[in-house]
Amino acid sequence: MDDAARIAEIYNHYVETDTATFEVETIGEARMAQRIAAVQFAGLPFIVATDALGIVGYAYASPFHERAAYGHTLTSSVYVDRGEQGRGVGRGLYSELMRRIAAVDERPHAPIHSVIALIALPNDASVALHESLGFHHVGTIAEAGRKFDRWLDVGYWQKMLFAPPA
C-alpha cells in the first residue's frame, strides 16, 4: 500500500470516529498525497513511524497562519493507528517532530520561534502528551466547531522553541 493511502487510512479513522480532527468527510489517497507534498514543499517535516507491517502513525508541522508575520510559528499534528495508541508511538513521533522543527533553518522565516497545537476538548490524553513535551495551555475557544451533533471547544497549547532576541 502506498504511504499516502495508509496515512489516509489512519487519518480517516479519526474523521469518522473522533473529534481529533474537525474534518467530517474522509479523504482519499490523492488528497492525502497533496497534503503531504504541500508540507514537504514548504520545507517542513512530515514523518512516519513504522513497524514490521508498515506505517503505524505520522506527525507533521504546518504553517500556523498564511500571513507573513506568522512565519515563525507552526502548528503540529500527530495521528496514530488505533491499534497502536498507548504504546508510545505518538510520543516518539512528537519528540522527533519537535527536534526537526527546531532544526528547520532553510525557510524564509527561520528559525521557528513557537509551535501551536490545537486540541478539541475534552481530550485528556492529548493534553497530557503535549504538556509532557513542554507545551502550555494559552487559551480556549468555546464551541469553535460542531461534530457528531455537539459543540466542541478548542484549546490552544504552545511551545516556545527559542528565547526572544534581547
Image (cartoon, grey):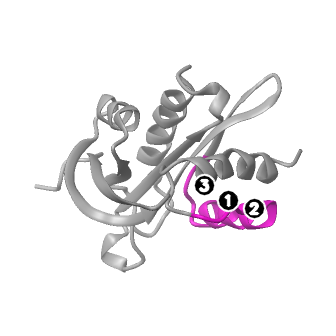
Q: How far apart are marks 3 and 1 (CA)?
A: 17 Å
Quarter of the figure that contains the N terminus:
top right
Residue type beneath disc 2:
Ala
Instruction: Using the image as rendered, state which of residue 146 and residue 40 is in the foreground.
Output: 146
Q: Which residue lies furthest to the left in this view?
A: 166
Residue visible at 80% across and 60% down in the picture? 29
**Mark 2 lies on residue:** 33
- Magenta stretch encompasses residue 35: yes
**Mark 1 lies on residue:** 36
Rendered location of residue 28, percent (x, y): 77, 62
Q: Distance between the residues labelled 3 and 2?
A: 17 Å
What segment is highlighted magenta in the picture?
24-46
Residue type beneath disc 1:
Ile
Q: How far apart are marks 1 and 2 (CA)?
A: 5 Å
Marks 1,2: beta carbons within 8 A: yes
**Is the residue marked by circle 1 packed among few (<14), some (14-19), or many (20+) residues within 10 Å?**
some
